[in-house]
Image: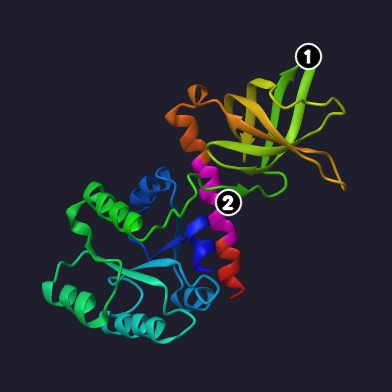
Amino acid sequence: MADMDFQFGKKVFFLNPPGVLSDVAAVLSAHEFEVYLVYNHSNLARYLKKEPHALVFVNLDEGMTEPEWEIWIRGLQADPETASVGIGVVTMLGDPEISRKYLLDVGITCGFVTLKIGAAKTADILLKTLEANEARGRRKFVRVACPPGTAELSAPFQDSVLRGTVHDLSTAGMAAWFDTATDVPVGFRVKDLQLTLRGARILLNGIVVGRRDDADGPAVRVVMFEPGSLSDEKRDKIRTYIRRTLQDEVNRRLESS
């Protein structure tokens, strides 16, 4: 299990995050960490039994009193099914006694972060913490399976238009089904490829680098995006889609936990 987590990375949860952490989460996402904002500590505690190598940052200022949060955190640590969860604390209150208690007595492993230092400094601290905890694993990019009807593509092809459905997606590339009987060969340059992700349109170029045959359906083509065709704005649109899709899936699982 640990080897798998190192390979695919770890989920990072911010529990009851204040507003400033929305901007911080976007920065962490831009560094290809898998970040979630959650608001129900009871559901999260149950869900973490299925994600025992996740990282959780608890906002001490919301949801419960600080002593109640201490009990909740110690409960995760005492449960064999969640004892390996990495825990950090975020708070607007820079109380050195509380900081000492959580770092030394409670024994949290992901730091005590005072948010009043500002979003940029907070993001820098959290980036270093996530790197130290190998939260990205061996992967370079967060990839998401695309729910039906949320990710489509089109591109000029010979004398017609190539259309298709995106199977899974990252900021580096995608796997897709093409809705055409025409064979799209490996090595083909897909120029002026338009992705439509939940209504957001992104124009870029890609190269077909692989093919996976499916006995029950059309072949899946693996397309890597040309870096020169991706601006920061286009990457942000792809990341927004990825984050929303992953968040929706985790929300669904939390509600059923």
Q: In the rendered view, would you say 248 is above or below 79?
A: above
Specify the color scheme.
rainbow
Query: Disc 1 marks which amino acid?
Result: Gln
Q: According to the image, label 2 marks what residue?
A: 245
Q: Callout 1: few (<14), some (14-19), or many (20+) C-alpha neighbours within 10 Å?
A: few
| Residue 206, quarter of picture | top right
Query: Is-magenta flag for residue 242?
Result: yes
Q: What's the residue at 43%, 51% (across, down)?
A: 33
Residue 34, horizontal then vertical, whole percent: 47, 54
Q: Is 89 on the left or on the right of 218, as rendered?
A: left
**Residue furthest toward the top?**
159
Disc 1 element: loop
Specify the quadrant that holds the C terminus: bottom right
Q: Is residue 35 among the parts visible in the rendering?
A: yes
Residue 176, horizontal then vertical, whole percent: 71, 38
In-front residue for pair 163/87? 87
Q: Is 63 on the left or on the right of 118, as rendered?
A: right
Query: Is-magenta flag for residue 12?
Result: no
Q: What's the residue at 30%, 82% (across, down)?
A: 70
In-front residue for pair 98/143? 143
Q: Closer to the N terminus: mark 1 or mark 2?
A: 1
Residue 160, horizontal then vertical, whole percent: 80, 17
Query: Disc 2 marks which amino acid?
Result: Thr
Distance of label 1 from label 2 (alpha carbons):
33 Å
**Residue furthest toward the front?**
3
Magenta stretch bounds: 239-249
Q: Main secondary structure of the magenta part?
A: helix
Q: In the rendered view, would you say 196 is above or below 137?
A: above
Q: According to the image, label 1 marks what residue?
A: 158
Disc 2 element: helix
